[in-house]
Amino acid sequence: MHHIEHFSQGLLTPLLGYALSVVGSLLGLVFAARARSTRPAGRVRWLACAPLALGGTGIWAMHFIATMGFAVSGAVIRYDVTLTALSALVSIAVVGGGLIVVSYGGPRPLPLLGGGLLTGCGVASMHYLGMAAMNTTVEISYAPGTVLLSVVIAVAMATAALWFSLRVRGRLFTLGAAMLIGVAATGMHYTGMFAMSVTGAGPAEPPPGAEAIDFLVPLLVGISLLTVGLLMAVMLAPSEKELRSEAELLARIEERRERTGPLPQVTGVPPLGGAAARRDRPASGPGRPGDGTAGGAGGRPSPPDPRSRP
């Protein structure tokens, strides 16, 4: 009789997974806030960073770290590298799709529910794709009711996360929202894991694939580099408050420009120093430059003619 252990490493894997989920969700919400405070031309780059943080670190990395605590007594577990990498791509892609739907669709119910359904079903697919990547010497089966419950939790989590991405403001509220997303992601993962049951009818030889520990170093290095890069992007970019102030200032300038209209263009005025200016210049008089009769060069009086004396 085989026994399933979900916490074979103690509380290390669930706590580490939850911490990763909170960090990733926090960064994802910050990027989403930057996106909604930026004009549409600059929104794409923030919407490209948010799925990496939320879908990559906040959801997929949390699931994989928590899976490292899974063990079956008397069984050998290996992981298919291709399917494991594909599950990460699925997580990032569905989170990105949901963020795009709500970002351009606005806070209306239909885009929010559609984005939540898309992202939640995608996250559930990511989870069970990761489980399909697990090769073991026992047969694995799932309880349909518990699987359905895990999908419902995933959809609810995704909808809440997308709503937070549209509404939450301020550091404290953003941190609280990230912690709630972490709770939901962790709960969805372990609900799906508790749906599993095993029997001893599997192959006797060790299955192909890599051990979980083989993923640990590349995973930690990749997550660390990704997190540091995303943090640098957040620190070097203007804050949400600064972006909002800039947008309000530009809107006021544009409104004033539309209200007052463009400056009038004066036509028909010759440039300074042109022929018209010389023509309109007053004629030279006595003592002025250019007077050839009463004044000499420079406006000085001409000396008297000696022959004019009597």
Image: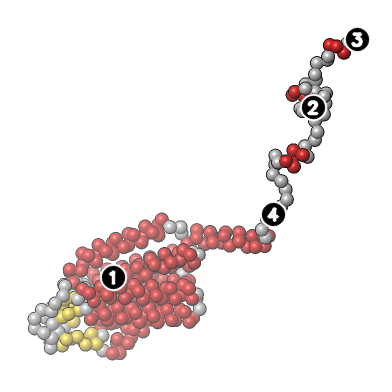
Q: Earlier in the sequence, mark 3 or mark 2?
A: 2
Q: Please state if 77 lies on the left or on the right of 26 as rendered.
A: left
Label 4 sits on a secondary structure element that is loop
Q: Please state if 44 lies on the left or on the right of 276 as rendered.
A: left
**In which quadrant will I find the N terminus?**
bottom left
Q: Which mark is residue 61?
A: 1
Farthest residue, direction bottom = 144
Residue 27 percent coordinates (x, y): 38, 65
Separation of disc 3 and disc 4 at Cα? 66 Å
Label 3 CA crowd tier, 10 Å (few <14, some 14–19, many 20+): few
Q: Earlier in the sequence, mark 2 or mark 4?
A: 4
Q: Please state if 281 lies on the left or on the right of 169 as rendered.
A: right
2 or 4: mark nearer the eye: 2
Residue 223 percent coordinates (x, y): 28, 64
2 or 1: mark nearer the eye: 2
Q: Which image quadrant is residue 209 in? A: bottom left
3 or 2: mark nearer the eye: 3
1 or 4: mark nearer the eye: 4
Separation of disc 3 and disc 2 at Cα? 27 Å
State the residue position of label 4.
265
Please name the amino acid that badge 3 sits on.
Pro
At x 28% / y 79%, what residue is drawn? 127
